[in-house]
């Protein structure tokens, strides 16, 4: 009889599994990635995988939730390095430009998964909405600190840049959105 897995090993296996799922799903989509491929690349048995995540949907939700925490933490860390409120808002677009230019960029993971499964899965839809609401709340906080009432417009610029960069593959979309945000904030000539 094999030895019981320690909590540390279970946590390590879980993170490794989520790494594999994130890489595969982001590169190929949810439906194109079979559980056998996930098993093969993770090195875990299907029994181990299903013990952690009873369904593929559960696995995708966990992956999105983990990616959300990392994505928003990275964005917030970058933005909050700026002291001036307007500079913080513009830093959102600088961070997005770098995100768009990263190797393997395929657009917004949440929009991609929503496009595949959002209409069929309440759990996926809820996770996508939670991410988008958190992103909107962060932008609203940063924009409100500027004393302007442009949070909605800046949020839409950021979301539009994400979608456009995902389709066009052009990281400079973020620069154009940044220039529009400067005008909205009143720090660039109209």
Image (cartoon, rainbow, N blue to C red):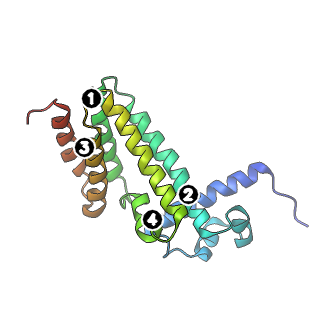
Q: Position of residue 72 (x, y in %)?
A: 45, 43
Q: Residues within 10 Å of mark 1 (few under 14, many from 20)?
A: many
Q: Quadrant of the N terminus?
A: bottom right
Report whether 57 appears left or right of 108. Answer: right
Q: Residues within 10 Å of mark 4 (few under 14, many from 20)?
A: many
Kindly give the residue lying farthest to the right in the view shown.
1
Marks 2 and 3 in Cβ contact (< 8 Å): no
Q: Residues within 10 Å of mark 3 (few under 14, many from 20)?
A: some
Mark 4 and mark 2 lie on one chain; the one further toward the N terminus is 2
Q: Which numbered disc covers residue 38? A: none
Kindly give the residue lying farthest to the top in the view shown.
83
Say which element carries label 4.
helix
Q: Quadrant of the C terminus?
A: top left
Q: Which residue is mark 1?
A: 86
Of tags 2 and 3, the one toward the viewer is 3
Q: Disc 2 to disc 1, how far (Cα)?
A: 33 Å
In this orientation, which residue lies closer to the viewer: 110 or 14? 110
Q: Which numbered disc covers residue 63? A: 2
Mark 4 and mark 1 lie on one chain; the one further toward the N terminus is 1
Mark 4 and mark 3 lie on one chain; the one further toward the N terminus is 4
Q: Position of residue 31 (x, y in %)?
A: 49, 75
Identify the residue at image location x=74%, y=71%: 47
Identify the residue at image location x=39%, y=30%: 80
Marks 4 and 2 in Cβ contact (< 8 Å): no
Q: Which numbered disc covers residue 153? A: 3
């Amino acid at each position: 009889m094999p030895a019981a897995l320690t909590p540390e090993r279970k946590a390590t296996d879980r993170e490794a599994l989520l790494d594999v799922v994130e890489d595969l799903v982001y590169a190929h989509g949810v439906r194109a990635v079979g559980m056998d491929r996930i098993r093969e690349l993770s090195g875990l048995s299907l029994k181990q995988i299903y013990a952690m995540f009873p369904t593929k949907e559960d696995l995708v939700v966990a992956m999105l939730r983990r990616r959300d925490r990392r994505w928003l933490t990275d964005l917030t860390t970058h933005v909050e390095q700026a002291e001036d409120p307007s500079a913080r808002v513009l830093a959102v677009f600088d961070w997005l430009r770098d995100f768009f230019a990263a190797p393997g960029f395929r657009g917004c993971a949440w929009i991609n998964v929503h496009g595949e499964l959002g209409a069929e899965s309440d759990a996926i839809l809820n996770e996508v909405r939670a991410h988008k609401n958190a992103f909107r709340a962060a932008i609203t906080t940063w924009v409100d600190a500027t004393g302007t009432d442009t949070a909605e417009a800046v949020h839409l610029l950021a979301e539009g840049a994400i979608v456009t960069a995902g389709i066009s593959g052009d990281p400079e979309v973020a620069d154009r959105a940044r220039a529009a945000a400067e005008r909205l904030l009143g720090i660039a000539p109209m």
